């Protein structure tokens, strides 16, 4: 067992994608919103759904099901997790957000072996009662070059909207 996250006790926001449960440190999340209208953009990357207007801020949206190669489906429980890093915000579509858990570091283990596309973003595997949580780092998803380009394009669009 090793210390994976920075705190002895971590607050983890739990969300689902298909049959899998994921977790994200609460400090990575700015807010969680209900699904809203997404404006599609001509984008060659399948998992970039488009953009939303979040209180005047143009926010790119990534579909985590598509990003992690999980078959896509939609329901009334779908949510968008808004994260912010370096002043840029981005949204992540998930199936549902179920709870916030307090997990100590002794219950979080380093990932072992290859876990497909999720592996690149995996911080650890949390074991809580009889459940397994794949704890990911949303900030690492923001380092994708195309996502950064999309954020920059949207920043430029916001500047034009403000001038009018």
Image (cartoon, grey):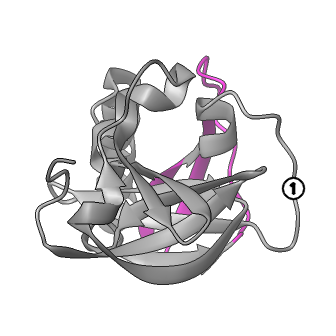
Identify the residue at horizontal 60%, vertical 63% (top origin). Answer: 131
Which residue is label 1 attached to?
74
Front residue of this view, candidates 72 and 111: 111
In the rendered structure, the answer to whether residue 75 lies left or right of residue 8 reads right
Decide which of 128, 78 is in the foreground and name it.
128
Quarter of the image for residue 86 reads bottom left
How would you rate the neighbour count of disc 1 (Cα within 10 Å): few for under 14, some for 14-19, many for 20 or more?
few
Q: Assess whether residue 113 is covered by the magenta stretch.
A: no
Quadrant of residue 48 in the image? top right
Q: Quadrant of residue 5?
A: bottom left
Query: Which residue is painted at 68% across and 33% down in the image?
Result: 66
Residue 133 lies, in percent from the top left, at 52, 56
Residue drawn where x is 23% and y is 64% of the image: 105
Image x and y of residue 100, in percent: 47, 82
Against 123, residue 44 (above or below) is above
Left or right: where 44 falls relative to 96: left
* Observer-nearest of 113 and 76: 113
Q: Position of residue 129 (x, y in %)?
A: 55, 72
Quadrant where the image shows the C terminus? bottom left
Q: Position of residue 54 (x, y in %)?
A: 50, 72
Residue 56 visible in the current orientation: no
Q: Nearer the viewer, residue 82 or 64?
A: 64
Residue 33 in sight here:
yes
Q: Measuring 52% from the left and 77% from the top, which residue is drawn there? A: 32
Residue 36 covered by magenta stretch: yes
Magenta residues?
35-61
């Amino acid at each position: 067992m090793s210390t994976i996250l920075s705190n002895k006790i971590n607050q983890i926001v739990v969300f689902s994608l298909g049959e899998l449960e994921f977790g994200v440190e609460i400090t990575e999340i700015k807010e969680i919103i209900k699904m809203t209208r997404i404006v599609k953009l001509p984008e060659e990357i399948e998992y970039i759904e488009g953009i939303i207007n979040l209180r005047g801020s143009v926010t790119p949206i990534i579909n985590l099901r598509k990003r992690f190669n999980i078959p896509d489906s939609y329901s009334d429980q779908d949510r968008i997790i808004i994260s912010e890093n370096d002043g840029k915000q981005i949204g992540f579509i998930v199936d549902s957000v179920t709870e916030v858990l307090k997990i100590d570091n002794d219950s979080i283990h380093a990932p072992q072996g290859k876990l497909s596309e999720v592996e690149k973003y995996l911080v650890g595997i949390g074991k809580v009662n009889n459940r397994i949580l794949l704890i990911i780092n949303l900030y690492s998803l923001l380092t994708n070059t195309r996502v950064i380009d999309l954020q920059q394009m949207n920043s430029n669009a916001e500047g034009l909207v403000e001038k009018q």
